[in-house]
Image (cartoon, helix red, strand yellow):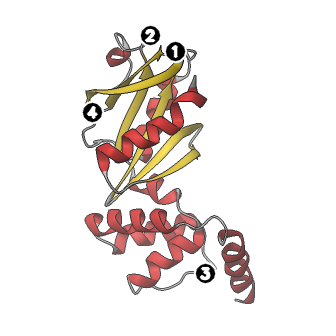
Amino acid sequence: YDKDIREPLFEFLEEQYGRIRILEEKQMGRSRADLVMVLPGAVAGVEIKSDADTYARLSRQVKDYNQFFDYNLIAVGSSHAHHIEEHVPDWWGIITIEQGEKDGKTWIDFYVLRKARENPNVDRKKTLGLLWRPELAHIQKINHMARYQEKSKKFVIDKILEKVPEKLLKEQISEELFERDYTKIEQEIREYRRQRRRL
């Protein structure tokens, strides 16, 4: 089951990729990403399909993941391992999961069936949309941009895309997500809104 997979999967991804941060259950379009894996200079989406899951929603999820993330991976239970390649694009990474029991203890093993390649369909506007307004404001600040506090989030995203080179922007998006502090964000958003109201 999904709940049994998550913690061991986090450890496996850390071993595979080194410096990462995992954000869980992130809304993206009409779907929800099981995991967002922040890497230096890239953001990856990870879908989990346990043996208890079906492919019913996968085609819609694939479309959403492809818009938001630089890389996409799917981690599947052994019952899906033989057919999963038919259901995801060939640039998606595939991790298979095997579970068993030995001496009364449950074990889980992960195998990389296919490495993830760069997603050709990522829409950087969508990736930037994952950031909160204070995070976007910080990107504006470090790139010496106007603040545009009275403007919409969409307007700000368009301006960032105009002004910041792609490679640098990918690194800055990652750093914002690495630094995201859920304990402070409510206060930061309140402060941001208060400043907007003063304008």
Residue 114 is situated, as x and y percent measured from the top left of the image, at 25, 28
Q: Nearer the viewer, residue 165 or 1?
A: 1
Q: Secondary structure at mark 3?
A: loop
Look at 71% across and 75% down and name the residue there: 187
Q: Secondary structure at mark 2?
A: loop
Vertical position of residue 35 compared to residue 80: above or below: below
| Mark nearer the N terminus (4 vs 2) | 2
Q: Secondary structure at mark 1?
A: loop
For residue 15, which quarter of the picture?
A: top left
Q: Nearer the viewer, residue 112 or 32?
A: 112
In space, the residues marked 1 and 2 are separated at their CA atoms by 6 Å
Tags 1 and 3 touching, CB below 8 Å: no
- Number of the label disc, if any, that sits on residue 90: none
Vertical position of residue 73 compared to residue 159: above or below: above
User: Which residue is denoted by mark 2 in the rendering?
Assistant: 79
Q: Secondary structure at mark 4?
A: loop
User: Which residue is denoted by mark 4 in the rendering?
Assistant: 91
Tags 3 and 4 touching, CB below 8 Å: no
Q: Nearer the viewer, residue 92 or 114?
A: 114
Q: Nearer the viewer, mark 1 or mark 4?
A: 1
Q: Is residue 23 left or right of residue 37?
A: right
Going by the numbered disc 1, the residue's amino acid type is Asp
User: Which residue is denoted by mark 1 in the rendering?
Assistant: 51
In space, the residues marked 3 and 4 are separated at their CA atoms by 38 Å
| Mark nearer the N terminus (2 vs 3) | 2
